[in-house]
């Protein structure tokens, strides 16, 4: 299994692939992933220029381990096939499908990726896929999309387009996105995939941004698409286990390992009744803490 | 590649460079750069190498650089050359495949 | 001759200026000297008036002639109108060969360029020059040499007689008819007149230029009547909008915020961060943001700053108001908050340029600094800094108090983004050196920080922190890996400027620029 399928993705930061000043060193902000955009950020008459820029960025800039996702143009456009060729030739880490609505869309992208992998001698399956859900149909088909490919690591909500399709708009209350978020996270978890929330564009409302992060964290999301490095610190704060959570998880893992050997099923940690059902969650907390670079224990 | 029309790629924003390619005889290169003192020779080398990889023998090339890194300079030269040589986005989308990893590298 | 920072100082410049090559930041410690003195025309007759109708008249009264040295201050920053006003009259009179000795010159002074070209002005001595004057000097348009001095170094040069001022023109926001000058209460308030104080003491003739004549006595005076020969009232001495701005909007640039955080983390993790610490900072986005972070930690830990000094902006005044700073001593005001504060807060004091930074008095305030936060265009792998010459080889900055505070502070922190476009700020060799690396302790970049290996004590206390600490060579390598290794700027042969060390020796020279040669 490609280990990147489950890597830590608290922040996925959009960058216009055509803007040299943005793509030259975004890693210093330490996002988990960058999303080099060939789609909406790039004007229609610069689609070709963005690809040359993307190719050399992928080949020549050391992004210091930050995941390089490329958002390609929608399957309804003429651009997406060449987009896939440049992604594969440049060996990005993942491709984000815009406006994905069905398993067939995922398969269409997979097919083009395979052709390109063949053409450029790139190992099959080394580049992953994620799908952006931007329509009511896409949301309705989340589970089928999530299970369409073993290379697909997760789905992301694109709130702007989705609300248009829903015939409403972003209100700031979250009510218009509530159904989509719930449906997505349930389907994604059922399929064993990651799930990412939409962007928050008001950079002057950092409190509102934090509240939204806290809400989607509570809902089960893995992370958030972001539009500015200012949003990284808050997102990481929300999505990184606290020292208290890490300490508890560490005790749970150690106790379960020990008690299992002694044949004991239920015991207490910090006065709380614990059984084997807590084990996967605790393990996940430790793994997240490790990935986020905040774990200092010996597990 | 044969430069058959005039085309431009890139912008005059900081860290970018704007490259204009026109039909010409031999390589006629002019470079203006905000970092000419530090990187004049490096920019010239990158531009000439990129033109050479693209097999451009005849063209007037004008570079206005605002401190672009090598990867950007290459991308802008390629952008202008392909646009000037019959690889518009329409032509690319109708199946004229770009030589990623070949002449573009 | 190679000086103590490794720069080659041409013999002909040593000969022409009579200055010695730089021998080390503290080489002249304890060296005795006799101060210069002005020629004074006393005014015993109480019926004589000091008021003069115009700049032209006052120039005549002062005996203006070819070859004189005229001095100016820069408290009006880019809103200054005094320099141009005076020089226009000098120009009209056909006077030649003037030396301008200013505490600094900026882009407001572009009208001086034609006067450099026609020989009205042949020498310039200033903290630095920006804009058109810098370009003109770097293009060889000044007949003599430009001498760049730090704020402390300028006071030293005047007091020691290295430069003798014939006439000092002092723009005064308010002045009475007997010459008492203040920096508040007028139309062009600048808060303090610190850098003009030495001019008033050492110039043969001192002229107050004001647009707000107030009733006698104008007290408390920054510059006293006892040193003033004449008072001229004019329409406008400055453009208030360019003298001081409103409170700067705090930066939201994450790179600057990262550097601010690193800077504050250095300060609070070193031993001088305790009650009564003495601190100076700048007005760049990162410096201002680091003041805010510092305030938060001072509040949290109950630590108070004993003294803040130097050029002052709003954020430091706010901490003073809040009681987190005990006292401020001020040599320049950068915004309206600072101007208001120095006029109203009893714990906010105006000090003179000598008190601030003169290395050859009996102890300047900079010597008491625990921390100074500075910026730099370039820092080389020996921690030498350049704040005067731009990457195009053109003189475009000013020494200010950079070398003075660096030499004085226990912990000198220099902030610079690793890359300015494609130009690496951390490099093998600076284009010019203004501040010797032996006085620079920590460089903070957006990619990480480097500690001067001379400061093992700082390395020891910071290695326990989570700060991203690198060797300075590693920061340079990171930069070069992105940009490529830069070529050195190609200069012509002629020396057009001298970067004077604060002690009066030659730190570096600046040569004329020339068109780029490809081969």
Image (cartoon, coloured by chain):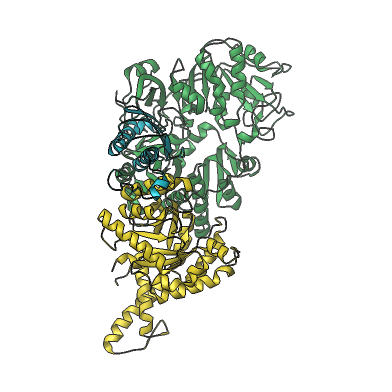
User: At x 58% / y 46%, what residue is drawn?
Assistant: C317
Residue C482 x %, y % = 33, 44
- Please say if C444 is above or below A261: above
Question: Which quadrant of the figure contains the C terminus of chain C?
Answer: top left
C151 relative position to A248: left or right:
right
- Please say if A129 is above or below C344: below
Q: Nearer the viewer, residue A158 or C359?
A: A158
C77 relative position to A78: left or right:
right
A262 relative position to C221: left or right:
left
The answer to whether residue C159 is seen in the rendering is no
Image label count: 0
- The shade of chain A is yellow
Question: Which quadrant of the figure contains the N terminus of chain C?
Answer: top left
- Please say if A198 is above or below C150: below
Residue C40 x %, y % = 59, 16
Q: Nearer the viewer, residue A251 or C222?
A: A251
Residue C137 x %, y % = 46, 21
- The shade of chain C is green
Residue C297 x %, y % = 49, 56
Q: Nearer the viewer, residue A232 or A34?
A: A34
> What letter labels the chain drawn in cyan?
B
The answer to whether residue B50 is seen in the rendering is yes
* Image quadrant where residue C13 sits: top left
């Amino acid at each position: 299994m490609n280990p990147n399928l489950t890597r830590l993705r608290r922040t996925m930061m959009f960058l216009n692939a055509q803007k040299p000043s943005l793509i030259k060193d975004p890693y210093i902000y330490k996002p988990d992933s960058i999303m080099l955009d060939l789609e909406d950020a790039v004007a229609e008459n610069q689609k070709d220029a963005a690809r040359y820029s993307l190719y050399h960025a992928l080949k020549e800039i050391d992004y210091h381990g930050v995941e390089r996702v490329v958002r390609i143009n929608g399957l309804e456009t003429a651009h997406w096939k060449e987009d896939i060729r440049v992604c594969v030739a440049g060996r990005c880490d993942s491709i984000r499908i815009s406006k994905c609505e069905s398993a067939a869309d995922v398969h269409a992208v997979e097919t083009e990726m395979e052709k390109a992998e063949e053409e450029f001698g790139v190992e099959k399956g080394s580049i992953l896929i994620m799908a952006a859900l931007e329509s009511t149909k896409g949301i309705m088909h989340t589970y089928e999309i999530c299970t369409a490919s073993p290379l697909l690591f997760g789905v992301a909500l694109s709130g702007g387009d989705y609300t248009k399709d829903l015939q409403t708009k972003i209100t700031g209350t979250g009510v218009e996105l509530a159904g989509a978020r719930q449906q997505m996270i349930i389907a994604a978890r059922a399929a064993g995939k990651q799930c990412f929330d939409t962007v928050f564009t008001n950079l002057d409302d950092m409190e509102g941004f934090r509240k939204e992060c806290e809400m989607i964290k509570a809902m089960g999301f893995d992370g958030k698409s972001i539009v500015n490095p200012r949003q990284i610190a808050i997102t990481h704060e929300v999505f990184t286990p606290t020292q208290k959570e890490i300490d508890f998880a560490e005790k749970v893992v150690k106790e379960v390992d020990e008690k299992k050997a002694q044949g004991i099923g239920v015991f207490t940690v910090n006065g709380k009744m614990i059984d084997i059902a807590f084990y996967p969650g605790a393990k996940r907390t430790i793994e997240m803490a490790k990935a986020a670079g905040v774990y200092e224990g010996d597990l | 590649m044969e430069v058959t029309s005039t085309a431009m790629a890139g912008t005059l924003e900081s860290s970018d460079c704007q490259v204009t390619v026109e039909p010409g005889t031999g390589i006629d290169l002019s470079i203006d750069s905000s970092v000419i003192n530090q990187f004049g020779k490096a920019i010239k080398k990158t531009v000439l190498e990129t033109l050479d990889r693209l097999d451009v023998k005849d063209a007037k090339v004008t570079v206005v650089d605002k401190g672009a890194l090598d990867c950007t300079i290459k991308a802008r030269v390629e952008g202008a050359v392909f646009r000037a040589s019959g690889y518009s986005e329409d032509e690319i989308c109708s199946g004229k495949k770009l030589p990623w990893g070949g002449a573009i590298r | 001759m190679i000086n103590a920072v490794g720069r080659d100082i041409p013999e002909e410049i040593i000969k022409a200026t009579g200055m010695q090559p730089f021998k080390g930041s503290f080489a002249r410690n304890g060296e005795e000297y006799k101060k210069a003195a002005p020629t004074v025309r006393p005014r015993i007759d109480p019926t004589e008036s000091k008021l003069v109708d115009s700049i032209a008249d006052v120039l005549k009264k002062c005996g203006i002639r070819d070859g004189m040295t005229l001095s100016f201050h820069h408290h009006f920053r880019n809103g200054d109108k005094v320099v141009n006003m005076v020089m226009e009259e000098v120009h009209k009179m056909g006077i030649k060969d003037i030396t301008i000795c200013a505490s600094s010159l900026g882009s407001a002074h572009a009208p001086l360029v034609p006067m450099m070209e026609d020989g009205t002005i042949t020498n310039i001595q200033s903290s630095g020059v920006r804009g058109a004057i810098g370009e003109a000097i770097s293009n060889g348009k000044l007949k003599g040499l430009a001498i760049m001095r730090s704020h402390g170094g300028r006071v030293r040069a005047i007091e020691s007689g290295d430069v003798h001022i014939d006439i000092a023109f002092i723009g005064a926001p308010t002045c009475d008819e007997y010459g008492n000058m203040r920096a508040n209460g007028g139309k062009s308030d600048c808060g303090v007149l610190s850098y003009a104080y030495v001019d008033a003491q050492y110039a043969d003739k001192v002229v107050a230029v004001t647009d707000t004549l107030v009733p006698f006595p104008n007290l408390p005076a920054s510059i006293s009547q006892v040193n003033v020969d004449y008072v001229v009232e004019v329409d406008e001495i400055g453009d208030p909008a360019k003298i001081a701005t409103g409170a700067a909007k705090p930066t939201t640039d994450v790179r600057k915020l990262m550097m601010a955080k690193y800077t504050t983390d250095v300060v609070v993790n070193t031993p001088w961060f305790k009650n009564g610490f003495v601190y100076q900072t700048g007005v760049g986005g990162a410096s201002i943001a680091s003041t805010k972070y510092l305030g938060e930690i001072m509040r949290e830990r109950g630590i108070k700053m004993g003294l803040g000094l130097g050029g002052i902006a709003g954020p430091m005044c706010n901490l003073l108001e809040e009681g987190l700073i005990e006292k401020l001593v001020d040599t320049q005001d950068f915004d309206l908050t600072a101007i208001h504060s120095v006029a109203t807060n009893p714990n906010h004091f105006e000090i003179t340029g000598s008190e601030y930074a003169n290395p050859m008095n009996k102890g300047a305030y900079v010597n008491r600094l625990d921390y100074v936060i500075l910026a730099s265009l370039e820092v080389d792998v020996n921690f030498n800094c350049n704040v005067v010459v731009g990457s195009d080889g053109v003189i475009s900055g000013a020494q200010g108090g950079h070398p003075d505070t660096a030499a004085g502070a226990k912990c000198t922190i220099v902030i610079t983004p690793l890359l300015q476009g494609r130009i690496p700020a951390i490099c093998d060799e600076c284009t010019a050196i203004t501040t010797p690396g032996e006085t620079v302790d920590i460089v903070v970049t957006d990619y990480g920080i480097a500690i001067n290996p001379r400061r093992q004590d700082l390395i020891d206390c910071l290695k326990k922190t989570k700060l991203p600490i690198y060797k300075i060579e590693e920061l340079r390598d990171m930069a070069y890996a992105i940009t490529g290794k830069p070529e050195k700027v190609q200069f012509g042969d002629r020396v057009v400027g001298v970067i004077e060390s604060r002690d009066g020796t030659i730190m570096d020279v600046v040569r004329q620029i020339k068109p780029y040669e490809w081969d």
